[in-house]
């Protein structure tokens, strides 16, 4: 009777849907679309990240609204295991509780709600890339004096359960879960034997232990079928020189200023690495400075200058400086760039545009933006550095911004660390002058360093959509400021001023002003929508499929076996904005072969195709650890990061049975079977009595066929 | 809980038919052949009705349309089995070592009906059983976790109904008593139409009438087979003494 009344109530409460021919499966399960899973990475000694069980971890939904909910989950819950559904604002407070007591935890579903974001959210360690730091670095995760003071280090921990992230744009999926939760799970002290709303998180990782083990497992084959369980991280670096370098003869080699920035960012979750302040602002500054210089100095004047600028964008820097380590290693072998390799003595100055943008929201009221130039020296600065600092601070102070030198060997995380490690002797005696430009001093101003929340809001970016027409002409900054389309406190304007000051400093002869419009558009491309005009103009003409509109480009470095988009985007932007646009058709463009240049046939502003001649090129960003034979993965010399292989990542929500249905079926099934057996037995046993009427009537009398068939014995 | 659900539902739907099969059919090879032949006939009827469903594109989304054709085809094939068995009965008896076969005229009807029913039950429940393995059950959008047990109960009902319908049908054909045949076809349509209500979660509105129909049909079949309630009571009484 209990069951029956239960059924009746639920039946009548439920809204009746007229579902025509819908598969049962679709009524039971509902997948949570747009979620991103935390996955497993490995280095020389450890495994980090998450993995679900083989078939996906199933757990009862528990919405965590307060910290006490998490405490209840680990200590008082009864119907476990549970999947904790938690917002980004509470995640950092409860995740340590759950990792410490994982017995009742099947997984975590993290969701972002743009109205209640935490003030800080960074899962990078307190000293990013601590173990690849160059000499003189004093940052240690145990100390209080750290760069990323808000970092939890979760990115570098082995988490015993899967974690999935649902971005703000998919908040209706969380509503779906909450609705189900409110219907079934609210009576939380009385959950045993009830139908409960549950989640299944599937993100099983094939790799385990560490890089050496997983590479060994990948190399072996089971039953002659090669299996791969992990891939080295890596992609491509992008480099571009103001003047073509291969045309130089050995006798008259031009000295070079190396200007570098990083492309990639990271987060715990697959496909989510927006990196607005972590990397995008620095990269955009570099590209804009490069394009400004390229516009002001015609290529034909190359012979007038005895100095060149080599712009380089490193990839994979989040994971122990993969890109810069490889470049420094290749320079030390005399193999970078492949055409006319660079020697250290050619480098007059190495300027790294580091992490910029984190402090932009702090100064959004006015036009100031204090920058800091870290110089890794004792008391005596190389002359190149002092000259540069003097010129640069003069250039920025005219725009109401400031540049303060910080003289310390304790450098913030940057590619300089790779050069300082690999060229230890040279950097120690200051024959390779180095400088790092950032917008923070003791600790990061970016509170979302390398996290899923390092979005465009973090740098206070508002897209103005005023920048370009179909011809690709940018409106000058002064005009935009004059007619009020932009204000001096806009991040776009500030970045353009930095780029302008930088360009001016790099080449005093040049007084170019970068177009703020290109910054507006480029930030929009990298932070808001990959389907923007600038990126589609910079895309290959042959590429017909349109990029994802309305989604920022994930800047995660990815694995070396697959080339990912960020390096391609950066390289093509450099090519489009700095290269010479030739008015020839595609076949002529492909046939063109000028030494020192490469040709790209890109879509162009009006999508009719344009041949771009550029010195831009790509070089591999795969850690030397994977190209050196017999490299000892525990030596900590180079980056050893690998990423696990996985089959699929999905989340679905459904109701798990309380067992009432199964019990009912079991009891009735047993009763019915026994009853049927008894009745059948009884009827059979007494057939002669019960069915007397017809039993004696011969069914087939004389009409039987001849008994010839008897020989056929069936 | 989910594997338990799978096995419990299988037990409920197929336990009684399997018990009946084991006690009455399994020992006799000819009966097994007839049962399998009947199951094959049900498959043929299902093939034809699915062809019709497939051809008539505009009515595909209406379950009722497909159902009408499925019931009609099943009854047609029940008639074909009847014809076939009546034609081959003598031969079957001849090739059988065991001359007990066909000692009762409606024995073949029972055997073929069970084959018919088990095959229809398998088709009705196999998709549902596949989803009952879990980990989820109904309830997210609509329905409750009792969906599986009601489906299994309904399947059992249909298997038994098919068995009894065959008995009544064969008897009706033998006696040219078209009322009985009308009852078979009519109740088949009735029960199938009731199952359309499942979609709207009126599980009990389906199951209770279906089992009432089953009870009436079972009693009718019992009578058709020449059974007499008085004898039953009498037997019980005698046994008790």
Image (cartoon, rainbow, N blue to C red):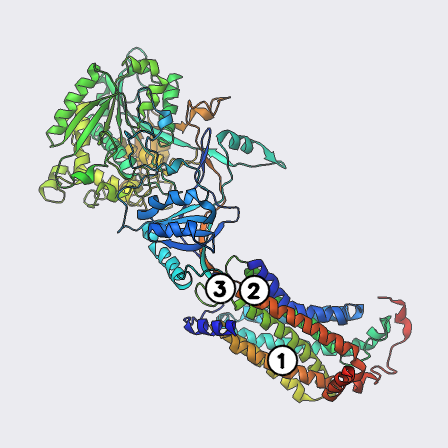
Q: Is residue B154 visible?
A: yes
Q: Secondary structure at mark 2?
A: helix
Q: Are marks 1 and 3 in contact (CB under 8 Å)?
A: no
Residue A633 left/right relative to A551? right
Using the image, name the chain to which the residue with label 3 belongs: B
Q: Residue at x 11, y 32 (%)?
A: A400
Q: Residues within 10 Å of mark 1 (few under 14, many from 20)?
A: many
Q: Are marks 2 and 1 in contact (CB under 8 Å)?
A: no
Q: Which residue is mark 3?
A: B138
Q: Which residue is mark 1?
A: B214
Indicate which label's residue lies in the foreground, 3 or 2.
2
Q: Secondary structure at mark 3?
A: loop
Q: Residue furthest top?
A: A251
Q: Are marks 3 and 2 in contact (CB under 8 Å)?
A: no
Q: Nearer the viewer, residue A337 or B200?
A: B200
Residue A255 left/right relative to B20? left
Q: Residue at x 43, y 31 (%)?
A: A641
As displayed, is residue A542 above or below residue B64?
above
| Disc 1 to disc 3, C-alpha distance | 27 Å
Kindly indicate the quadrant of the structure image that contains residue A500. Answer: top left
Please state the horizontal and vertical placement of residue A427, each as a whole percent of the image. 30, 16
As displayed, is residue B174 above or below residue A160?
below
Q: Residues within 10 Å of mark 3 (few under 14, many from 20)?
A: many
| Disc 2 to disc 1, C-alpha distance | 24 Å
Say whether disc 1 or disc 3 marks the residue closer to the N-terminus.
Answer: 3
Q: Residue furthest left?
A: A482
Q: Secondary structure at mark 1?
A: helix
Of the 4 image quadrants, the one containing the C terminus of chain A is bottom right
Q: Which residue is mark 2?
A: A662
> How many numbered marks does the figure carry?
3
As displayed, is residue A668 above or below residue A529?
below
Using the image, name the chain to which the residue with label 1 belongs: B
């Amino acid at each position: 009777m209990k069951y029956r009344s239960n059924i009746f109530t639920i039946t009548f409460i439920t809204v009746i849907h007229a579902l025509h021919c819908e598969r049962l499966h679709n009524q039971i399960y509902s997948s949570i679309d747009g979620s991103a899973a935390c996955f497993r990475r490995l280095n020389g000694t450890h495994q980090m990240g998450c993995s679900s069980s083989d078939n996906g971890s199933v757990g009862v939904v528990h919405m965590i609204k307060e910290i006490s909910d998490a405490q209840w989950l680990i200590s008082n819950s009864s119907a476990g295991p549970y999947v904790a559904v938690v917002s980004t604002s509470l995640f950092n407070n409860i995740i340590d509780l759950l990792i410490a007591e994982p017995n009742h935890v099947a997984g975590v579903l993290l969701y972002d709600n743009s109205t209640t974001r935490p003030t800080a959210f960074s899962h990078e360690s307190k000293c990013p890339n601590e173990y690849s730091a160059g000499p003189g670095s004093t940052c240690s995760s145990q100390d209080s004096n750290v760069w990323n003071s808000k970092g939890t280090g979760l990115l570098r921990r082995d988490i015993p359960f899967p974690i999935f992230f649902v971005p703000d744009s998919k908040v209706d999926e969380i509503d779906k879960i909450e609705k189900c939760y409110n219907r079934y799970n609210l009576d939380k002290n009385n959950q045993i034997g009830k139908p409960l709303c549950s989640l299944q998180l599937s993100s099983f990782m094939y790799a385990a232990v560490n890089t050496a083990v997983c590479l060994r497992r990948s190399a072996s084959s089971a039953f002659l079928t090669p299996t791969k369980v992990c891939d080295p991280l890596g992609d491509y670096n992008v480099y571009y020189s103001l003047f073509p370098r291969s045309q130089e003869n050995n006798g008259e080699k031009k000295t070079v200023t190396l200007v570098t920035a990083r492309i990639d960012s990271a987060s715990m979750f697959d496909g989510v690495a927006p990196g607005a302040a972590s990397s995008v602002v620095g990269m955009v500054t570099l590209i804009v400075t490069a394009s400004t210089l390229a516009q002001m100095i015609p290529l034909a004047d190359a012979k007038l200058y005895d100095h060149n600028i080599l712009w380089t964008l490193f990839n994979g820097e989040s994971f122990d400086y993969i890109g810069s380590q490889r470049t420094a290693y290749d320079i030390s072998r005399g193999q970078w760039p492949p055409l006319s390799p660079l020697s250290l003595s050619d480098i007059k100055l190495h300027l790294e545009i580091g992490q910029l943008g984190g402090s932009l929201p702090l100064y959004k009221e006015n036009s100031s933006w204090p920058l800091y130039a870290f110089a890794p020296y004792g008391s005596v600065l190389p002359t190149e550095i002092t000259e540069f600092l003097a010129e640069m601070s003069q250039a920025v102070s005219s725009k109401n911004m400031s540049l303060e030198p910080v003289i310390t060997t304790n450098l913030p995380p940057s590619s300089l660390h790779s050069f300082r490690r690999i060229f230890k002797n040279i950097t120690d005696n200051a024959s390779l002058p180095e400088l790092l430009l950032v917008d923070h001093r003791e600790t990061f101003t970016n509170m979302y360093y390398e996290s899923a929340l390092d979005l465009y809001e973090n740098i206070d970016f508002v897209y103005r959509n005023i920048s370009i027409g179909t011809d690709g002409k940018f409106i000058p900054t002064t005009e935009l400021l004059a007619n009020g389309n932009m204000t001096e406190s806009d991040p776009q304007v500030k970045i353009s001023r930095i780029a302008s000051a930088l360009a001016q400093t790099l080449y005093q002869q040049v007084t170019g002003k970068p177009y703020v419009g290109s910054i507006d558009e480029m930030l929009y491309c990298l932070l808001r929508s990959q389907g923007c005009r600038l990126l589609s103009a910079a895309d290959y003409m042959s590429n017909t499929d349109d990029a994802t509109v309305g989604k920022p480009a994930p800047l995660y470095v990815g694995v070396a076996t697959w080339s990912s988009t960020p390096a391609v985007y950066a390289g093509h932007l450099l090519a489009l904005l700095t290269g010479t646009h030739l008015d020839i058709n595609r076949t002529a463009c492909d046939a063109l072969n000028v030494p020192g240049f490469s040709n790209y046939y890109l879509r162009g502003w009006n999508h009719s195709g344009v041949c771009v001649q550029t010195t831009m090129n790509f070089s591999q960003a795969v850690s030397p650890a994977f190209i050196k034979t017999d490299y000892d993965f525990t030596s900590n010399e180079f980056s050893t990061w690998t990423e696990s292989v996985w089959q699929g990542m999905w989340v679905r929500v459904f109701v798990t049975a309380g067992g009432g249905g199964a019990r009912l079926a079991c009891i009735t099934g047993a009763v019915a079977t026994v009853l049927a057996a008894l009745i059948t037995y009884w009827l059979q046993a007494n057939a002669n009595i019960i069915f007397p009427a017809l039993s004696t009537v011969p069914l087939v009398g004389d009409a039987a066929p001849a008994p010839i068939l008897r020989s056929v014995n069936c | 809980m989910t594997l338990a659900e799978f096995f419990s539902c299988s037990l409920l739907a197929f336990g009684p038919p399997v018990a009946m099969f084991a006690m009455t059919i399994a020992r006799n090879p000819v009966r097994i052949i007839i049962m399998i032949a009947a199951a094959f006939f049900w498959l043929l009827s299902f093939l034809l009705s699915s062809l019709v469903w497939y051809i008539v594109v505009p009515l595909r989304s209406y379950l009722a349309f497909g159902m009408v054709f499925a019931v009609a085809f099943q009854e047609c094939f029940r008639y074909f089995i009847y014809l076939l068995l009546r034609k081959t009965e003598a031969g079957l008896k001849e090739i059988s070592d065991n001359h007990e076969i066909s000692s009762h005229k409606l024995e073949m009807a029972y055997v073929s009906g069970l084959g018919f029913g088990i095959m229809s039950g398998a088709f009705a429940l196999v998709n549902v059983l596949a989803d009952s393995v879990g980990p989820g059950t109904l309830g997210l959008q609509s329905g409750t976790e009792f969906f599986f047990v009601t489906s299994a109960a309904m399947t059992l009902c249909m298997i038994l109904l098919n068995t009894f319908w065959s008995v009544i049908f064969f008897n009706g054909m033998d006696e040219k008593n078209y009322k009985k045949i009308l009852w078979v076809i009519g109740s088949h349509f009735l029960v199938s139409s009731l199952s359309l209500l499942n979609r709207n979660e009126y599980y009990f509105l389906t199951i209770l009438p279906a089992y009432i129909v089953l009870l009436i049909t079972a009693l009718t079949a019992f009578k058709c087979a020449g059974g007499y309630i008085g004898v039953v009571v009498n037997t019980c009484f005698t046994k008790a003494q």
